[in-house]
Amino acid sequence: MSDEQRDVIEILEHDHHEVEEMFTELESLRGASTEEAQQRRKTLTEQVTIELVRHSVAEEVLVYPQVTAKVSAEEVEHARKEHAEAEETLHRLEKLDADDPAFDDELATLMEEIRHHIEDEEGEMFAHMRQAIAPDELRKLGARVEAFKKVAPTRPHPNVPNDALSRTVTGPAASLFDRMRDLATGRGRD
């Protein structure tokens, strides 16, 4: 890759690809009964959760306000609803062990929700963003998203409204608390 800053769409598409790779591995482990395989499923699910939360909060705080202003408030409202649904699923999933009978169902629900959301973004929103937002602005937004994801929360917080103001106000405390919990439990170190 060149030294040039990737634009926000390239960054978000890369995130989507990484999550899809984790989903594929999780699907290959479905029904696995060994302790090692179940632990891998739980660890992968935690990694998916971390990535999805960081990604979605960055979109809500930085990307969606730009899309609302320059592309379509309706597309953003639809995406926010999808985020809220997925965050509820992540919250339920976080409480389950990999050997819990409900784990596979919640994981399947999450994969369906996220794959639909990715299809919407990559099929419509991103194309509209390329038409309405200048390339230089997309690169600047990409740099901001990359920096933001480094300090974003890592756990779902479904009781926090998923709008830019609410996420900006609660984000620093939530992120600190999440990262302290992650450090104490060893979550996300894989």
Image: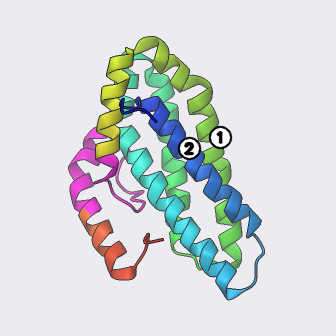
What amino acid is found at the position of numbered circle 1 in the picture? His
Rendered image quadrant of residue 92: bottom right
- Residue at the outermost bottom position: 35
Residue 178 % position (x, y): 32, 67
What amino acid is found at the position of numbered circle 2 in the picture? His
- Whether residue 43 appears in this view of the structure is yes
Which contiguous range is marked in magenta? 148-175
Identify residue for label 1. Answer: 116
Residue 81 % position (x, y): 50, 41
Residue 166 highlighted magenta (yes or no): yes
- Give the colour scheme shown: rainbow
Q: How many marks?
A: 2
Query: Which of 61 and 134 lies nearest the eye of the viewer?
Result: 134
Q: Residue at x 58, y 23 (%)?
A: 124
Up-down relation of residue 1 to residue 20 (above or below): above
Residue 126 % position (x, y): 52, 25
Rendered image quadrant of residue 134: top left
SS assignment at label 1: helix
Residue 143 highlighted magenta (yes or no): no
Q: Residues within 10 Å of mark 1 (few under 14, many from 20)?
A: few
Q: Are marks 1 and 2 in contact (CB under 8 Å)?
A: no
Single out the mark in the foreground, 1 or 2.
2
- Whether residue 99 appears in this view of the structure is no
Up-down relation of residue 3 to residue 93 (above or below): above
Give the numbered dot on residue 16: 2
Q: Residue at x 70, y 68 (%)?
A: 104
Residue 52 % position (x, y): 48, 52
Q: Residue at x 47, y 55 (%)?
A: 51
